[in-house]
Amino acid sequence: MKKIVLTSIFVAATAAYLSAASFTACAACHGANGEKAALGKSEIIKGWPEAKTIEALNGYKAGTLNVHGMGAVMKGQATKLADADIADLAKQIAAMK
C-alpha cells in the first residue's frame, strides 16, 4: 500500500514539474507569469483564454501569424511544440491571474 501511495505522489509531483517546466522557454521573454510584453512588442499573455493561446501558437507554428513583427521569433519557438504541448501551455497561461 505504501508503494502505491508513494508512486502516486511521485507521478503527481513529476507531472506538476513537467507542466511547470514547459513555460520556462516562454518566461525568458514573457516573464515568469506572462506579465511582460515580450521584447517590448507583444501583448501581455497573462490570463489569455486557452483558445486564444492555441490559435496564436498554431498560427505562429504554421507561419501565418506575424503580430507586432514577432512571427519569425515565435515560429522558431512554436515549431518545437507538439499539439499536446500547445494545449498544456494554453492551460498554464489561462491559469495565470
Image (cartoon, rainbow, N blue to C red):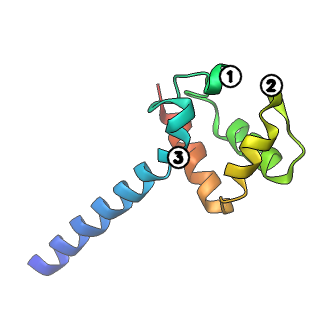
Q: Does the rendering let one see residue 65?
A: yes
Labels 2 & 1 near each other (Cβ < 8 A): yes
Q: Residue at x 80, y 43 (%)?
A: 72
Q: Amino acid at mark 3?
A: Ala
Residue that mark 2 sits on: 68
**Image x and y of residue 11, in percent:** 30, 68
Labels 3 & 1 near each other (Cβ < 8 A): no
Q: Secondary structure at mark 1?
A: loop
Q: Amino acid at mark 2?
A: His
Q: Amino acid at mark 1?
A: Glu
Instruction: Name the outermost residue toward the right.
Output: 64
Q: Residue at x 72, y 51 (%)?
A: 76
**Image x and y of residue 37, in percent:** 61, 22
Query: Which one is in front in this view, the residue at disc 3 or the one at disc 1?
Result: 3
Instruction: Name the outermost residue toward the left.
Output: 2
Q: Give me the disc on residue 43.
A: 1
Distance between mark 2 and mark 1 Cα atoms: 9 Å
**Image x and y of residue 67, in percent:** 82, 29
Please tell me which of labels 2 and 3 falls first in the chain.
3
Q: Secondary structure at mark 2?
A: helix
Residue that mark 3 sits on: 25
* Depth order, front residue of 24/97: 24
Q: Secondary structure at mark 3?
A: helix
Distance between mark 2 and mark 3 Cα atoms: 20 Å
Query: Which one is in front in this view, the residue at disc 2 or the one at disc 1?
Result: 2
